[in-house]
Image: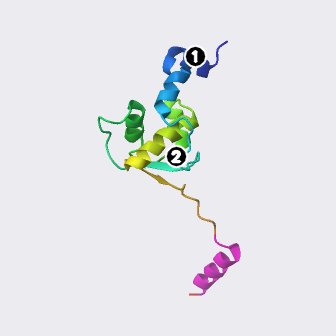
Amino acid sequence: MNSPRRERREADPALSDPERLYVITGDPDGSERAQLDLVTMIVAQAQPTPTVQPEQAVILRLCQAPLSVAEISAYLGLPFSVVTSLLTELLAAGLIESRAPIVRATLPDRSLLEAVMHGLQKL
């Protein structure tokens, strides 16, 4: 029984073609790549232009609302390393912006909340 990922690769030869992935990434050594991780949020700053690669145009359309690098990788069905290469080019061109993930605010100390509550009850 084939896995869904294997079936998708068999259906789309571009996903299983290492030459295609090499052409997409452009920079073979990756030394110029931006420091992105899986949870870095990406937001498009412009609409796709005719000069960007098809995969980059898809990224620009997807990222009208913030998406993490992991989500972009999943939507495109491309490895993380390939996606970071595409994003690096878009960052250099000023077509996207990367943001640190929004950290959930820490809850205030319980004793502080109780003191405020008691103070409000005395009013």
Image-based side of 105 in relation to 49, left or right: right
Quadrant location of the C terminus?
Answer: bottom right
Foreground residue among 52 and 74: 52
Q: Amino acid at mark 1?
A: Glu
Image coordinates for residue 65, horizontal then vertical, percent:
41, 47
Can residue 112 be found in the magenta stretch?
A: yes
Which residue sits at x=49%, y=24%?
Answer: 20
| Magenta span main SS | helix
Foreground residue among 83 and 27: 27
Helix, strand or loop at label 1? It is: helix
Few, some or many C-alpha atoms within 10 Å of disc 2 (few <14, some 14-19, many ≥20)?
few
Residue 121 occupies which quadrant of the picture? bottom right
Few, some or many C-alpha atoms within 10 Å of disc 1 (few <14, some 14-19, many ≥20)?
few
Q: Which residue is mark 2?
A: 32
Image-based side of 38 in relation to 64, left or right: right
Lower position in the chain sequence, tag 1 or tag 2 = 1
Which residue sits at x=35%, y=36%?
Answer: 52
The reply to whether residue 65 is visible in this rendering is no
The reply to whether residue 53 is visible in this rendering is yes
In the picture shown, does residue 123 fall above or below 92?
below
In the picture shown, does residue 47 fall above or below 16?
below
Residue that protrudes farthest toward the bottom in the picture: 123
> Real-space Cα distance between discs 1 and 2?
34 Å
Helix, strand or loop at label 2? It is: loop
The residues colored magenta run 108-122
* Residue 7: mark in rendering: 1
